[in-house]
Amino acid sequence: MPRRRKYLNYTTPWGVDLARVAQSGWTPFLIHESGYQPALEDWNHEGVDSPFWRFYYNPKPGCHLLFEGRKMPLGPKCAVLIPADTVFDCCGPVKASHFWLHFTTARPGVSVPAAPIVIEVDDMLSAMLGQMIATHREPPAELRDHRLHHLSAALLHTVFAVLETGAPPVMPERLVEVLALIARAPHGKLTNPFLAERAGMSVERFIRAFREHTGQTPAAYVLGTRVRLAGEALALTDKTIDQIAVGFGFPNRHYFSRMFARQVGCGPGEFRARQRDRKDR
């Protein structure tokens, strides 16, 4: 006779409701690349920037970043978290023992300044970084890469847990679903009436609620998301600019180039050339 199973509610009076926190927290990390090189010959690069976030750690001292005239050493006791669209110089007077992560994340309603953030490497973080570097030293294999992905996510959650960015108000679930839809299908016809219908609100109420919780109008948020994702595609894929324009909801290359230049400061062709010239630095 089958054993009767006892189902329990997923919440209890003694735990912390993390589902509530998740709705107002950072969106999941999309990890593009993890890398480690024990002795890079030339790590001197000016004006490095990217549409994605970076995490840098050098287990040996001697190299540093330069940001707006400020020297930021890299070594066994300090790492650096670099938000998207931050411009900085890599300075390597010695061979660089260098670990890096490239990833994308966002926090609706919270603006993060484009400036490197120094992260103290305590014993726990040092152990995690040591494990990641050791995993990178293993022979390439599918299982190794899966482990690197999980270790990278754990590392980023550990780093972001100590950031003091303030807690935005909890976002209504219907708006969380709209943001997920925009990220999942940026090529769609994401008009205010369409998004308002998905949220189960009138257009006027939807625009007001969206601005309250994200700090932007729906149209500005959609455009910003499309430009950000298109920038990632320019940096990380070999798709043509026309393919990227259509794939992220722009009617044509000309309009895409104009909107991209307005937000990023240069056209998509120049942006791609600059990213490829600085890849993996």
Image (spheres, rainbow, N blue to C red):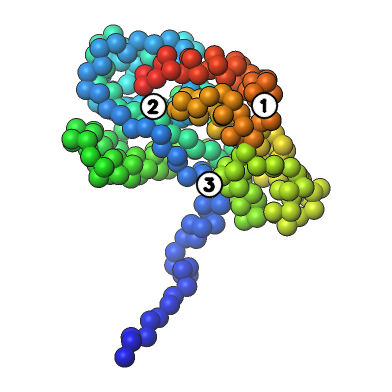
Quadrant where the image shows the C terminus: top left
The type of residue carrying mark 3 is Gly
Could you tell me how many numbered marks the image carries? 3
Residue highlighted by disc 2? 80
In the drawing, what numbered circle is on residue 252?
Answer: 1
The type of residue carrying mark 2 is Val
- At which x and y percent is residue 160? 43, 39
Image quadrant assignment for residue 103: top left
Left or right: 129 in relation to 183: left
**Dot 3 alpha-carbon crowd within 10 angstroms: few under 14, some 14 to 19, many 20 or more:** many
Q: Which residue appears at 47% of the width and 73% of the height?
A: 9
Label 1 sits on a secondary structure element that is loop
279 vs 6, nearest the viewer: 279
Give the distance between the C-alpha atoms of the residues marked 2 and 1, in whole angstroms.
38 Å
Q: Which residue appears at 34% of the width and 28% of the height?
A: 100
The type of residue carrying mark 1 is Asn
157 vs 147, nearest the viewer: 147
In the drawing, what numbered circle is on residue 89?
Answer: none
Tell me which numbered mark, 1 or 3, is placed earlier along the sequence.
3
Left or right: 169 in relation to 3: right
